[in-house]
Structures are given as structure tokens and as C-alpha cells.
Image: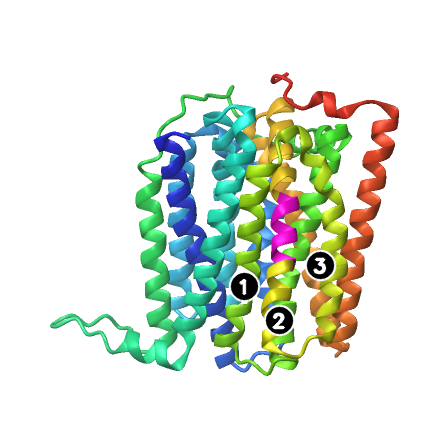
Amino acid sequence: MNRGFYTIMAAQFFSSLADNALLFVAISLLTSMNAPASLTPLLKLSFVLFYVLLAAFVGAFADSLPKGRVMFIANIVKVFGCALMFLSVHPLLAYAVVGFGAAVYSPAKYGILTELLPPEKLVPANGWIEGLTVMSIIFGTVMGGTLVSERGSAWLLSFDLPGISTGIDTGAEAAMAVVVGIYILAALFNLRIPDTGARYEHQERNPAKLIADFANCSATLWRDKLGQISLAVTTLFWGAGATLQFIVLKWAERSLHMPLDKATNLIGVVAIGVALGAVMAARMIPLRKSLTVIPLGIIMGLVVCSMVFVTSVNFAYPLLTLIGFLSGFFVVPMNALLQHRGHVLMSAGHSIAVQNFNENLSILTMLALYAIMITLNLDLDIIVVMFGLSVAGIMYFIGRRHAANQREHDSLALIGEHKH
């Protein structure tokens, strides 16, 4: 791994740290507005909306400029979204603008890895990136919970700059100022990311042609015997992961009687498990063995169902760590395989845009279903069991599909082939 890779990791860490802290600041704002409970999962839904709406365009944009510059522009958009919250714009709308920046950021963040590193380095690189992203989730969740707590707000508001009126009068505004500072730090790292020298042919600007090109790229990846399996797994993982985040918060409140600032620690526990699983997968699973981890997805779904029997924090921590570990261990090899096939079949930015579209469409769908269940006052235990069995069942059918592909043709021979 070279210096450029570590600069990318630092930029990604701080940008993701701010994203995760901001979610809980936004949740706190909704709570202070006495908004209905169904709006909380809609926060994440508004964040990922632009991943789906802009999927046909962000890949071309990521490939039209050096990736570091694209990431810098995206972080500035995120700062603008935070500024809207300062101006009392509704959290759902302001957080959607931050999601717009994140949608632009993502193809560049992952696309630059395939430009910078050879295929055999992609699993370790993804292990590092996912591990660091998960660390940012841990620190961001805990930071967000701390910033919106009474003690955290009081501590932030105690700071006073002599002779300067900041206009920051509430705990939420003070928390937002901290988040903006972290986004600016990430933007500074973006400016230090080296130009890989990768250049793509002139990028199409006609919206209709971009959509047609995106549809072609999407069809290409879904038809590919390895691409379809890895894309299906990562699509399920991100949809399930986003929904599990809100399920855990609700479960902590109902079964463990924990307030929001304490419940955020449980999200951090899941993230610790994901980080451990990601690091172990990076060390143990080479790219050619990436598909052997599919059964762990089935096990993870079944383990989630056992949450309904847990009412003690002492049992909650190891259970959530295990769920996180299984998630991290099976998603990192799948992510690396998907990036490799995307790079072989098309450009880096277009490949990641297809991946983002499918994964975030999954997040939108699963969060919308969860919001409907909450609105219908469905019992949380029923929601947890339905969620766990759905994940296990879908992973089982994905495994069956891969086995059928293998009987037809040895698709594993495609791993490691050169760009078409």
C-alpha cells in the first residue's frame, strides 16, 4: 500500500465520521420537534435517495475529473447541507442535501482503488477501507450520541470566543459546528490525494444517453456470473445494515430501556464486530476464495432472530458483536470481487455507480417497509424475526444461484482476468 492509499483512507475516515455523527444530530432535531417515530428511518431514506436518482450521472462525473477533486467537491456539498440545518431547514431536506454530496463522493472513493492498486491488493485494501469506515461508524455514532446528550451540549456551549459572536445558542447548533469542522478536515485530505493518471474517454453529457449507458452497464454486471452474485450479496447487505441500525435503536429503547445517547453505543458494538470481521476476511480470504463466505450470510440472518430473547445488556453486547463480525467477514470479499468484475467489464466510476444504485435502492425499499411496519405499530419482535429470516432466506437463494452457475460453467476462472 502506498502513501496515496493512506491519504484516501484518512479522507474517507473523517468524511464518514461526520456522516454518522450528523445522523444522530438530525435524529435529535426531529425528537426536539416532536416529530412522529416513523420519520426517524425516513432520515436515512432521504440520505440515500440521491444515490438512486443520480446513479446514471455520478459515475460519469467521477470519471471526468481526478477522483481527489471529485471527493473535495462532494465534501463541500455536505458542508452546505449542514449549513441548511443551521438555517432551520427541515432535517429531512437538509440531510437529503448531505446525501447528495455522499452520492457524488462514493464512486470516486471506491473507483480510485481500482486505479491505484492491482487486483490482488483489492481484498486487503477493502479490508482496510471497510475496517476504517466501520471505525468511523463507531466513533461517529458514539460522538453523535455524546454531542446530543445533555452533558455534551452543555460542554460545547461552555466554549466562548472572546469578542466573537458565533450565533450558536443551542446544543444542536454546537453539535452541527463540530460536524462541519470534521467535513472541512476531510476536504483538506481530499486535496492531498494524488492524481493516479487514469483518464477515461470523453464523458457523455446528454442525460438520455447517460441513462441508456447506465442501464447497459447495470445489465452487463447483472448478466456476469460473478458480478450478479457479488452484487446481489452487497445489495442485500447494505439494505439490511441500514435497517438493522434503526431496529437496534428501537430494540435498545424497548427491550433494554436505554435512551438515545446510550443506545448509540450498541450501534458502535455492531460496528466493532464488522471491523473485526472485515480485518479477518482481509487476512484470510483471497479474491479467488471470496464466494466461500456466502453461508455466513445465512447464519447472520438466523443469529439476528435471537435478538428477541435478549433483555440484558450483558447478552446484548456479545450478540451484536457476533452479528457485526459475520457481516464484516462476508461482505468484504464480496465487495472486492464486485469491484474487480466492475473494473474488468467497465470503468471504475460507472461500476461503483451501478453498485450504489442497487445497494441504495435496497436501503430505500427496506427502510420504507420498516417505516410502514412502525406506522402500523407492528410488534418489534415480529419485525426482528421477519428481518432475520428474510436475510437468511435471500442469502440461501443467492447461494443456490451460484451453485447453478458453477454447474453450467466454472465462473471462478474469471477471477483475476485482465480488463476487457
Asked if the residue at tag 3 contacts the one at tag 1, i.e. Cβ–Cβ closer than 8 Å, the answer is no
Residue 153 appears in which quarter of the rendering?
A: bottom left
Residue range highlighted in magenta = 323-331
Tell which circle, 2 or 1, labels the residue nearer the N-terminal end.
1
Residue at the (64%, 65%) spot, across then down: 319
Is 74 on the left or on the right of 415, as rendered?
left
Taking 364 as reference, is 154 above or below it? below
Residue 146 screen position, x and y as percent: 41, 72
Query: Mark 1, residues whose alpha carbon is within 10 Å: few (<14), some, or many (≥20)?
Result: many
Give the labeled residue for mark 3: 366
Position of residue 173 relative to residue 275, above or below, is: below
> Residue, x 54% and y 58% (percent of image)?
271
The amino acid sitting under disc 1 is Val
Q: Is residue 3 above or below residue 199?
A: below
Please state the horizontal and vertical placement of residue 106, each as a whole percent of the image: 51, 42
Q: Position of residue 150 (x, y in %)?
A: 39, 82
Q: Is residue 329 magenta?
A: yes
Label 2, secondary structure: give it: helix
Q: Measure how far apart labels 2 and 3 are at the Cα level.
A: 23 Å
Kind of element beneath mark 3: helix
Q: Name the residue nearer the viewer: 14 or 174.
A: 14
Report x, y in % for residue 50.
Answer: 57, 50
What's the distance in space between the residues labelled 2 and 1, CA to CA? Answer: 9 Å
11 with respect to 363 (left or right): left
**Other-residue count near label 2 (Cα within 10 Å), few / some / many at <14 / 14–19 / ≥20:** some
Give the CA distance from mark 1 to mark 3. 22 Å
Q: How is the image coloured?
A: rainbow
Q: Quadrant of the N terminus?
A: top left
Quarter containing the C terminus: top right
Residue 269 badge: 1
Q: Residue at x 43, y 56 (%)?
A: 17
| Label 2 vs 3, first from the N-terminus | 2
